[in-house]
Image (spheres, grey):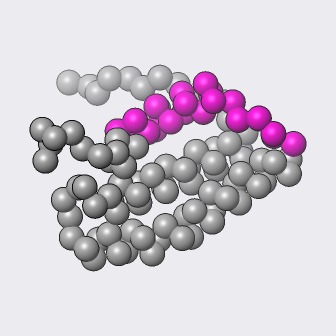
Amino acid sequence: MLPPELPPMPALTRAEGELIDHYLEVVDLLGRINPARPGDTYRGLRAAQALVSKATALREALALMHQRGEHEVHAPTLARALRVLDGERRAARVALPSDSDS
């Protein structure tokens, strides 16, 4: 059985693509650090150490967008890109799990 076909990725500027990529990297790391989720402290420590450089890359992507005159975030387009890249599931790991998940 073939997996369901993903919707097409929306057209993004290079800077928007970098913003999305770096944002999801930060989200993934925050999900690994989330103290409400099971895991060991070493994994959280490694994720926290990596978070510094990933957050810097995210800041630089936003600064580049601003320097290039991209002053508005096109939220609907970027939200579609996040959905195609499984952003909802990835971001859910940052949230507090429900009581039934504990």
Give how far across and how far down residue 65 sits, in percent: 77, 47
The answer to whether one can see residue 9 in this image is no
Region rendered in magenta: 69-89
Give how far across and how far down residue 34 sits, in percent: 32, 58
The answer to whether residue 43 is magenta is no
Q: Residue at x 72, y 47 (%)?
A: 15
Q: Residue at x 50, y 36 (%)?
A: 82
Secondary structure that dominates the magenta span: helix
Q: Does 16 appear above or below 43?
A: above
Q: Quadrant of the N terminus?
A: top left
Q: Does 73 appear above or below 76?
A: below
User: Left of 39 or right of it: where is 11?
Assistant: right
The answer to whether one can see residue 50 in this image is yes
Q: Nearer the viewer, residue 18 or 5?
A: 18
Give how far across and how far down residue 2 sits, in percent: 26, 25
Residue 4 falls in which quadrant of the image?
top left
Residue 37 falls in which quadrant of the image?
bottom left
